[in-house]
Amino acid sequence: MDENEAAIRERLTAVESSVKSAHHRIDNIEELTQSVKSLAVETKYLKEDISDVKEKIDVIAGRPSQILTVIITALITATISGFVGFAITNLLK
């Protein structure tokens, strides 16, 4: 029986060691899971921030064409007003 008990003790010690090692690995996996969760949340917020910045860039990129439209409209209006003024001045002479 002593040999049998010794073998059982050795196996029990090996099993305890294996269980302890498994618990350490599980703890590490739980830490990694929390890290991945944190990264996912940060990525979500980063994506929202990038979307906001993209919208602002689109607005800013559209401004030059708006300014150009206003300038062209002003030039056309000034030119037509000049011609009309010239025509009226010549008609009144």
Image (cartoon, rainbow, N blue to C red):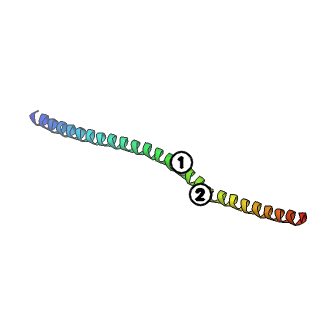
Pointer 1: residues within 10 angstroms few (<14), some, or many (20+)? Answer: few
Instruction: Decide which of 13, 60 is in the foreground and name it.
Output: 60
Question: Mark 2 sits on what residue?
Answer: 61
Instruction: Decide which of 24, 14 is in the foreground and name it.
Output: 24
Residue 84 found in image quarter: bottom right
Residue 65 found in image quarter: bottom right
The residue under the point 40% across, 42% down is: 37
Q: Secondary structure at mark 1?
A: helix
Count all numbered tags in the image, as a single digit.
Answer: 2
Image x and y of residue 26, in percent: 30, 40
Instruction: Decide which of 30, 36 is in the foreground and name it.
Output: 36
- Where residue 78 is drawn, which disc sits there? none
How much space separates mark 1 and mark 2, taking CA atoms?
A: 14 Å
67 in relation to 14, above or below: below
The residue under the point 16% across, 36% down is: 8
- Where residue 52 is drawn, which disc sits there? 1
The residue under the point 27% across, 41% down is: 22
- In the image, taking residue 82 as reference, residue 16 lies left or right, namely left
Under mark 1, the amino acid is: Asp
| Quadrant showing the C terminus | bottom right
